[in-house]
Image (tube, rainbow, N blue to C red):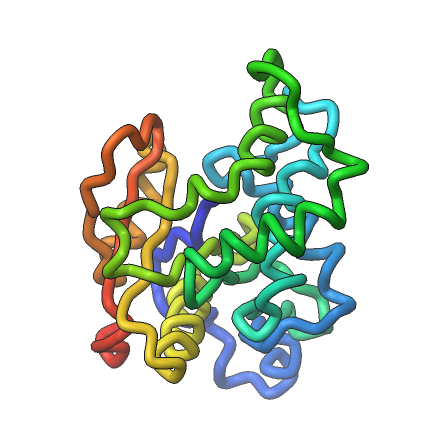
Amino acid sequence: MAPDIEARQGNGDRGDPSTAATSPAVRPFRPDDRASLDEICIRTAHIGEDGIPGRRDAGILPAIFTQPYVELEPDLVFVLDDGRGQPVGYILGTADTPRFAEDFRAKWLPLIADRYPAPSGPPGTADEAMVAVLHSPERMVVPELADYPAHLHIDLLPGTQGRGHGRELMRTFLQALQDRGVPAVHLMMATANVQARAFYERLGFEEIAVPDSGPMTCLGRTTQALDAL
Protein backbone atom coordinates (compact mmCIF):
# COMPACT_ATOMS: atom_id res chain seq x y z
CA MET A 1 0.00 0.00 0.00
CA ALA A 2 1.22 3.48 -0.75
CA PRO A 3 2.28 5.98 1.93
CA ASP A 4 2.23 9.70 2.25
CA ILE A 5 5.06 10.98 0.04
CA GLU A 6 6.24 13.78 2.28
CA ALA A 7 7.75 16.90 0.78
CA ARG A 8 7.45 19.36 3.63
CA GLN A 9 6.23 19.72 7.20
CA GLY A 10 2.92 21.31 8.14
CA ASN A 11 0.12 22.71 6.00
CA GLY A 12 0.84 26.43 6.13
CA ASP A 13 -2.28 27.48 8.04
CA ARG A 14 -1.25 27.13 11.66
CA GLY A 15 -1.67 30.84 12.34
CA ASP A 16 -5.26 31.11 11.17
CA PRO A 17 -7.80 30.00 13.83
CA SER A 18 -10.54 29.73 11.21
CA THR A 19 -8.62 27.04 9.32
CA ALA A 20 -7.18 25.27 12.38
CA ALA A 21 -10.59 23.85 13.20
CA THR A 22 -10.67 22.02 9.89
CA SER A 23 -7.00 21.06 9.62
CA PRO A 24 -6.34 17.33 9.17
CA ALA A 25 -5.42 15.55 12.40
CA VAL A 26 -4.65 11.99 13.47
CA ARG A 27 -7.17 10.33 15.76
CA PRO A 28 -8.16 6.80 16.82
CA PHE A 29 -10.42 4.73 14.59
CA ARG A 30 -14.19 4.90 15.10
CA PRO A 31 -16.64 2.20 13.94
CA ASP A 32 -18.30 4.58 11.49
CA ASP A 33 -14.95 4.98 9.69
CA ARG A 34 -15.11 1.49 8.17
CA ALA A 35 -16.52 2.40 4.76
CA SER A 36 -14.13 5.32 4.36
CA LEU A 37 -11.10 3.16 5.13
CA ASP A 38 -12.25 0.62 2.56
CA GLU A 39 -12.58 3.37 -0.05
CA ILE A 40 -9.11 4.75 0.72
CA CYS A 41 -7.67 1.26 0.44
CA ILE A 42 -9.19 0.79 -3.02
CA ARG A 43 -8.25 4.25 -4.25
CA THR A 44 -4.57 3.86 -3.29
CA ALA A 45 -3.99 0.16 -3.92
CA HIS A 46 -2.05 0.34 -7.19
CA ILE A 47 1.27 1.98 -6.23
CA GLY A 48 -0.65 4.75 -4.56
CA GLU A 49 -3.27 5.03 -7.29
CA ASP A 50 -6.74 3.63 -7.89
CA GLY A 51 -6.88 -0.14 -7.47
CA ILE A 52 -10.20 -0.68 -9.27
CA PRO A 53 -9.10 -0.91 -12.94
CA GLY A 54 -8.72 -4.53 -14.02
CA ARG A 55 -10.73 -5.92 -11.12
CA ARG A 56 -14.35 -6.98 -11.21
CA ASP A 57 -14.67 -6.84 -7.44
CA ALA A 58 -12.47 -4.20 -5.82
CA GLY A 59 -13.92 -5.23 -2.44
CA ILE A 60 -11.36 -8.00 -2.21
CA LEU A 61 -8.69 -5.39 -1.45
CA PRO A 62 -10.13 -4.06 1.84
CA ALA A 63 -11.14 -7.63 2.72
CA ILE A 64 -7.40 -8.32 2.95
CA PHE A 65 -5.82 -5.01 3.87
CA THR A 66 -8.23 -3.03 6.08
CA GLN A 67 -11.25 -4.97 7.32
CA PRO A 68 -9.41 -7.75 9.21
CA TYR A 69 -7.34 -5.18 11.11
CA VAL A 70 -10.42 -3.18 12.02
CA GLU A 71 -12.11 -6.39 13.16
CA LEU A 72 -9.18 -7.98 15.00
CA GLU A 73 -7.02 -5.05 16.22
CA PRO A 74 -9.09 -1.84 16.24
CA ASP A 75 -6.86 -0.31 18.92
CA LEU A 76 -4.03 -0.22 16.38
CA VAL A 77 -6.03 1.59 13.70
CA PHE A 78 -5.53 5.35 13.41
CA VAL A 79 -7.05 7.69 10.84
CA LEU A 80 -6.17 11.04 9.38
CA ASP A 81 -9.33 13.09 9.84
CA ASP A 82 -9.89 15.99 7.43
CA GLY A 83 -11.13 18.13 10.33
CA ARG A 84 -14.76 17.47 9.57
CA GLY A 85 -14.94 13.86 10.68
CA GLN A 86 -14.05 12.33 7.30
CA PRO A 87 -11.03 9.97 7.10
CA VAL A 88 -8.61 10.82 4.30
CA GLY A 89 -5.86 8.43 5.35
CA TYR A 90 -5.02 5.70 7.82
CA ILE A 91 -2.36 3.54 9.38
CA LEU A 92 -3.17 0.12 10.79
CA GLY A 93 -1.51 -3.15 11.62
CA THR A 94 -0.78 -5.66 14.32
CA ALA A 95 1.62 -5.93 17.22
CA ASP A 96 2.08 -9.70 16.74
CA THR A 97 2.10 -10.99 13.17
CA PRO A 98 2.06 -14.75 13.94
CA ARG A 99 -0.91 -14.35 16.28
CA PHE A 100 -2.66 -12.10 13.77
CA ALA A 101 -2.23 -14.72 11.05
CA GLU A 102 -3.83 -17.31 13.33
CA ASP A 103 -6.73 -15.00 14.14
CA PHE A 104 -7.10 -14.10 10.48
CA ARG A 105 -7.72 -17.75 9.63
CA ALA A 106 -9.78 -18.67 12.67
CA LYS A 107 -11.82 -15.48 13.16
CA TRP A 108 -11.77 -13.40 9.99
CA LEU A 109 -11.99 -15.87 7.12
CA PRO A 110 -15.21 -17.48 8.43
CA LEU A 111 -16.89 -14.07 8.27
CA ILE A 112 -16.29 -13.64 4.54
CA ALA A 113 -15.89 -17.19 3.22
CA ASP A 114 -19.35 -17.09 1.65
CA ARG A 115 -18.44 -14.01 -0.38
CA TYR A 116 -14.91 -15.13 -1.22
CA PRO A 117 -14.75 -18.94 -1.23
CA ALA A 118 -11.35 -20.60 -1.09
CA PRO A 119 -9.92 -21.11 -4.60
CA SER A 120 -10.18 -24.60 -6.07
CA GLY A 121 -7.23 -24.24 -8.44
CA PRO A 122 -4.50 -21.88 -9.66
CA PRO A 123 -5.72 -18.28 -10.11
CA GLY A 124 -6.60 -17.22 -13.63
CA THR A 125 -7.50 -13.57 -13.04
CA ALA A 126 -6.31 -10.69 -10.87
CA ASP A 127 -9.34 -11.14 -8.64
CA GLU A 128 -8.66 -14.85 -8.21
CA ALA A 129 -5.05 -14.12 -7.34
CA MET A 130 -6.18 -11.80 -4.55
CA VAL A 131 -8.65 -14.39 -3.25
CA ALA A 132 -5.72 -16.79 -3.04
CA VAL A 133 -3.84 -14.19 -0.99
CA LEU A 134 -6.88 -13.77 1.26
CA HIS A 135 -6.96 -17.50 1.99
CA SER A 136 -3.26 -17.79 2.80
CA PRO A 137 -2.70 -15.68 5.93
CA GLU A 138 0.28 -17.86 6.84
CA ARG A 139 2.17 -15.98 4.11
CA MET A 140 2.59 -13.18 6.67
CA VAL A 141 4.73 -15.34 8.96
CA VAL A 142 8.30 -15.23 7.63
CA PRO A 143 11.23 -16.59 9.68
CA GLU A 144 13.49 -13.70 8.66
CA LEU A 145 11.03 -11.28 10.27
CA ALA A 146 10.97 -12.87 13.72
CA ASP A 147 12.78 -9.85 15.19
CA TYR A 148 10.16 -7.54 13.65
CA PRO A 149 6.94 -9.02 15.08
CA ALA A 150 4.64 -6.11 14.21
CA HIS A 151 3.59 -5.06 10.71
CA LEU A 152 1.66 -2.15 9.25
CA HIS A 153 -0.15 -0.68 6.25
CA ILE A 154 -0.39 3.07 5.63
CA ASP A 155 -2.41 4.88 2.94
CA LEU A 156 -3.37 8.50 2.30
CA LEU A 157 -5.46 10.02 -0.44
CA PRO A 158 -3.40 12.04 -2.95
CA GLY A 159 -4.66 15.42 -1.78
CA THR A 160 -3.27 14.86 1.71
CA GLN A 161 0.20 13.73 0.69
CA GLY A 162 3.34 15.82 0.96
CA ARG A 163 2.25 17.65 4.10
CA GLY A 164 3.79 15.65 6.93
CA HIS A 165 0.65 13.66 7.70
CA GLY A 166 2.26 10.33 6.85
CA ARG A 167 5.03 11.05 9.32
CA GLU A 168 2.46 11.93 11.98
CA LEU A 169 0.53 8.72 11.36
CA MET A 170 3.71 6.67 11.53
CA ARG A 171 4.81 8.32 14.77
CA THR A 172 1.41 7.62 16.33
CA PHE A 173 1.47 3.97 15.31
CA LEU A 174 5.07 3.38 16.41
CA GLN A 175 4.35 5.01 19.77
CA ALA A 176 1.41 2.66 20.25
CA LEU A 177 3.68 -0.30 19.53
CA GLN A 178 6.36 1.03 21.86
CA ASP A 179 3.76 1.41 24.63
CA ARG A 180 2.95 -2.30 24.17
CA GLY A 181 6.59 -3.29 24.46
CA VAL A 182 6.89 -4.27 20.78
CA PRO A 183 10.55 -3.91 19.72
CA ALA A 184 10.27 -3.55 15.93
CA VAL A 185 7.90 -3.46 12.95
CA HIS A 186 8.04 -4.40 9.28
CA LEU A 187 6.09 -3.63 6.13
CA MET A 188 5.90 -4.93 2.59
CA MET A 189 5.88 -2.52 -0.34
CA ALA A 190 5.91 -2.77 -4.12
CA THR A 191 9.52 -2.55 -5.21
CA ALA A 192 8.46 -0.37 -8.14
CA ASN A 193 7.17 2.32 -5.78
CA VAL A 194 10.43 4.26 -5.46
CA GLN A 195 8.74 7.30 -3.92
CA ALA A 196 7.32 5.16 -1.13
CA ARG A 197 10.75 3.65 -0.54
CA ALA A 198 12.25 7.13 -0.13
CA PHE A 199 9.52 8.07 2.35
CA TYR A 200 10.11 5.02 4.49
CA GLU A 201 13.86 5.45 4.46
CA ARG A 202 13.49 9.02 5.70
CA LEU A 203 11.63 7.55 8.67
CA GLY A 204 14.41 5.11 9.48
CA PHE A 205 13.20 1.97 7.72
CA GLU A 206 15.83 -0.32 6.24
CA GLU A 207 15.56 -3.25 3.86
CA ILE A 208 15.28 -6.74 5.30
CA ALA A 209 16.37 -9.59 3.05
CA VAL A 210 13.42 -11.95 2.56
CA PRO A 211 13.69 -14.90 0.14
CA ASP A 212 11.19 -15.23 -2.71
CA SER A 213 9.59 -11.85 -2.11
CA GLY A 214 8.78 -11.43 -5.81
CA PRO A 215 7.86 -7.84 -6.77
CA MET A 216 7.78 -6.78 -3.12
CA THR A 217 10.43 -5.35 -0.82
CA CYS A 218 10.41 -5.75 2.96
CA LEU A 219 11.49 -2.87 5.19
CA GLY A 220 11.73 -2.65 8.96
CA ARG A 221 12.74 -0.43 11.86
CA THR A 222 12.70 -0.42 15.64
CA THR A 223 9.95 1.30 17.60
CA GLN A 224 12.57 3.43 19.39
CA ALA A 225 14.09 6.83 18.52
CA LEU A 226 10.70 8.35 17.73
CA ASP A 227 11.98 11.84 18.48
CA ALA A 228 13.81 11.67 15.16
CA LEU A 229 10.56 11.31 13.21
Q: Which quadrant is the C terminus positioned in? A: bottom left
Percent x, y for residue 192? 34, 30
The one nearer the camera, 172 or 202, is 172
Q: In this view, does 182 lie to the left or right of 78?
A: left
How far across and how far down the image is residue 58, in percent? 69, 33
Q: Nearer the viewer, residue 185 or 115?
A: 115
Figure label count: 0
The one of 167 and 217 positioned closer to us in this rendering: 217
Q: Is 4 located above or below residue 26 in the figure?
A: above
Q: For residue 59, what is the image quadrant?
A: top right
Residue at left offset 27%, top offset 72%: 183
Residue 141: x, y in percent?
38, 48
Question: Residue at the spot x=60%, y=44% of the render?
Answer: 64
Q: Residue at x 59, y 48 (%)?
A: 105
Above or below, 208 relative to 170: above
The image quarter in which residue 10 lies:
bottom left
Q: Where is residue 124 in the image (x, y as percent from the top left)?
A: 60, 12
